[in-house]
Amino acid sequence: MTAQDEIKIGGLGSSRRRVEDARFVRGKGNYVEDVVLPGMLHMEILRSPIAHARIKSIDTTKAWQVPGVKLVLTGEMAAQRNLAWMPTLSYDTQAVLATDKVRFQGQEVACVVATSPYIARDAIDLIDVEYEPLPPIVNPMQAVAPGAPLIRDDKAGQTDNVCYRWEVGDKEGTDRAFAAADVISTMKLHYPRSHPSPIENCGSVADYNKATGKLTVYMTTQAPHIVRAAVALIAELPEHLIRIISPDIGGGFGNKVPVYPGYVCSILASILTDRPVKWIEDKSGNLMSTGFARDMYLDAEMALTHDGRILAVRMHADSDNGAFFADAQPSKFKIGLLHSAFACYNVPVAHMTAQGCYTNKAPGGVAYRCSFRVTEAMFFQERMVEAAAQDVGLDPAEFRRRNLLRDDQFPHRTAFGFLVDSGQYHKCLDIGLNAIGYDQFLKDRAEAASRGRLLGIGISTMTEPLGAGNSREYDILGIKMFDAAELRVHPTGKAVLKIGAQTQGQGHETTFAQIVTHELGIPAADIVVEHGDTDHTPFGMGTYASRSTPVAGAATAMVARKIKAKARKLAAHLLEVSEEDVEWELGRFYVRGAPSRGATIQECAMAAYANMPDGMEPGLENNAYYDPPNLTWPFACYIATVEVDPATGVWDVLRFVAVDDCGVRINPMVVEGQIMGGLTEAYAMSNMQFQTYDEDGNIVGGNYMDYLLPTAWETPGFELHEVTTPCPHHPIGAKGVGECAAVGGPAAFVNAVMNAIADSGVRNIDMPVLPDRVWDALRTGRDVSCPPPVKTD
Amino acid sequence: MDVEDRRITVTVNGEAHTVEVEPRLLLAHLLRTGLTLTGTHVGCDTTNCGACTVLVDGVPVKSCTMLAVQADGTEVTTVEGLTGHSELHPVQEGFSVEHGLQCGFCTPGMMLTTVALLKENPRPTEDEIRWALSGNLCRCTGYQNIVKAVMWAAEKLDPAGVRA
């Protein structure tokens, strides 16, 4: 079977239509909000209107009196079950329902459970909470200022608002390199707080069966198996009696990794009422209280030679972690993978320090369409590179040429300790520059400038670590980060693949079948992929950080290979030759030297049930657990051209070229869909989408009227290009891809705007690069950096 | 609430339903809960995201911001009404062929807005499509393939048509 034949049956490289679409375009998806169980009650949450306050009293009397109300749940009641607090994924604790203080606006204070969501909302309004306001802290600078109020007075031994300090790299070596540098380039940046904001909010339907002791929870989670383990630990329920079902998920982007108080409350409410309890968050609840991303300040410098070679990098990051240290990240590194910065460049030595602070803002720090803190890493890196090129007087493309790793340097150990294993960085850069017409654009830019028009071009090149584990450095609550797949081939040669990963739009039901097709030659249409139900799928760590294809996809290839090994024995038996004389072509074994004598994979499958050799265990099914030896390292080169209107500060994207090397592409259509989605989020981040708080700790972007997301109208078009460097350790050479664009994209847009206004002397405008900030920078000739909290009325 | 229920008649996907509803009941909730048509999704409650878009007498309406009682006497089309007995509507087909959806949550609203657009403007330009869909948010696709999907459907619905 040729590669073209393989594509025809939906194997590797086939842009086959998605099997998920059949239900989605008919409105027949099954999202958590669609789940209805007999006798189901509805839960609503009362949230704190204040950022920081002591709770003096909670009076629920009137709420209990509303007809239809079955339960009013407070922190005090949760505490009786030891559930007022729960562990976070970063080994901190988080309040489920506030008992002592509220620590951010939107924090969960009480719940009402009633026969309809409308009644529950009515009763929520009748709960009377008396607050004693405390001074709020809304950024890390305030958090460490002398006399700052202690946010986490619940924690024994906590005397300040610092939640972690961390460092990595070679401090002394870096100091020496800086002492010998020709040029030192400095940069201060803020990556603003953002919210992943899937259109579907979070929710759950908890169903505790008192008779059997079984707890079933339908939940908007990207990681159902982890949730099962977490619920067992948090609620002290036996894990074999917990079933987590993650049905269709309306987008996740990292927001649906953590365990949220609402989930826990719905479980507790079901236990207390002996009825199924549904909780569906509204958009404000989602934006105010669930996992945000970013919110990090950088103070960094780069040591350089006169001719623009990087000698060393020094970085300090301050992260704003909100009221609870709930970063959803499984690495052993407190700042996630921020130290993957500069992984694609020759950097001999580097040192990084980081400090995280508690503030009176929502907890989170989720990996929003990225590996953990990698978006910040690559944005900081590419803004620093742009500034450094300027400081040594080099064209930014030429600066990158002088510093990007060459093809003959792999594998390469980075100054921060990562092992980057593959790539063709210079080729990607050249394709990108050629596609955008770099030299011509520079001429056009100069010509436009002579007529008062501001054109700019911005490059971003980066590799990012995707696909955690390995199990040595990555775990969640102590559980190592690997993944599993189980494959059953039925007698007629049709197959069921069960995976521990969980799709939220990535199309696993389509693409994972293609991996099996590639390995076994069973047409993809004959393979069904099951996921998202912990009772019926093997263990997996979930889908985030682009880890599904690198880890669960590898497990899928490996289990298919186990199936093939057994099928080979069956083929030898059918063909009456020894196993050594059996050759394989996709979908079929044949006798060496006599290719017409063969047995298809389907014939082998039937033989496994109907005609197995003596002594062979019947059946054709197996499972595989896969612990990746390394992360995967896709590379991308993104180039944007923009025009800035000097009169208004508004900037428009003229063109955007993306060159992605994500290794072998399983379904090119799906890969390109992921890239375009990521680029749109990158565009959003660079020019409109951010969450901010006023000085009282009121969230400013707490609903879709105030939290700007790009529509079809603003979003530019994207021109996609491709380079393929197979991953050296992945069974089919694939790398992660879903997040590269969102990670590497923002710097391309910002670099382009800064390039357009370079003559003004302005070095940096922090994201989002809003028109008023551009206008302000052009007017004053000064940077617009780390805007202080704004006063609102 | 102490307000009396109201009796309304709404024709949904060609079938007349007479129901007693609270005056405050949202049309989206009548469709989803009362009539179990769960293809209409609720995303934001503030008329921004468009996931709840349905056609009311042929006009796209965000059903989270319309009361069920306001729909009394109207004809409502939801995503479930687009499909014939077996055939997909060309708009549904186009979204799948051009990979105009990923998680599927915004898709019903996107498709209903598209149906209304193509009825009014059978051969829209890319700009016209982007403008028409600007009340429907998608977080997965980046819109580029949605635009292609609409163009695919336009071609399918009106093969002989020429761009205005």
Image (cartoon, helix red, strand yellow):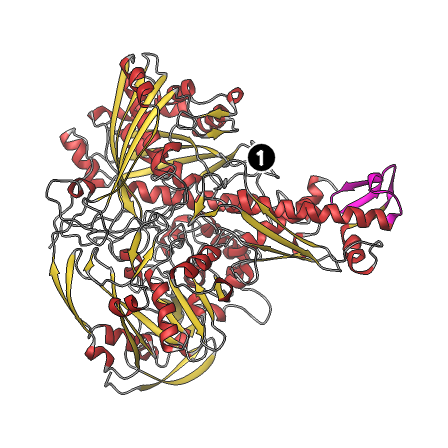
Side (left or right) of A696 relative to A115:
left
The residue sitting at 88% across, 36% down in the picture is A593
Please tell me how crowded label 1 is: few (under 14), some (14-19), or many (20+) other residues with Cα within 10 Å. Answer: some
Q: Which residues fall within the magenta stretch?
A: A575-597
> Quadrant of the rendered structure where residue A343 is?
top left
Q: Quick check: A660 above or below A514? A: above
Question: Is A581 colored magenta in this rendering?
Answer: yes
Taking the spot 40% from the left edge, 66% from the top edge, the residue there is A204
Task: Work out whether residue A447 or residue A557 is closer to the camera in this orientation and state it.
Answer: A557
Is residue B94 highlighted in magenta? no
Q: Which residue is mark 1?
A: A729
Q: Residue at x 23, y 86 (%)?
A: B2
Any part of residue A450 in sight: no
Residue A428 location (% of width, % of height): 49, 28
Question: Tag 1, which secondary structure?
Answer: loop
Judged left or right of residue A385, residue A553 is right
Image quadrant where one finds the N terminus of chain A: top right
* Residue A198 % position (x, y): 38, 55
Query: Could you say where residue A66 lies in the image, as x and y percent from the top left?
Result: 24, 82
Residue A765, by quadrant, is: top left
Q: Is residue A482 visible?
A: yes
* Total marks placed: 1
Q: Amino acid at mark 1?
A: His
Between residue A426 and residue A779, name the one nearer to us. A426
Give percent across and percent down for residue B98.
52, 51
Q: Is residue A706 left or right of residue B146?
A: left
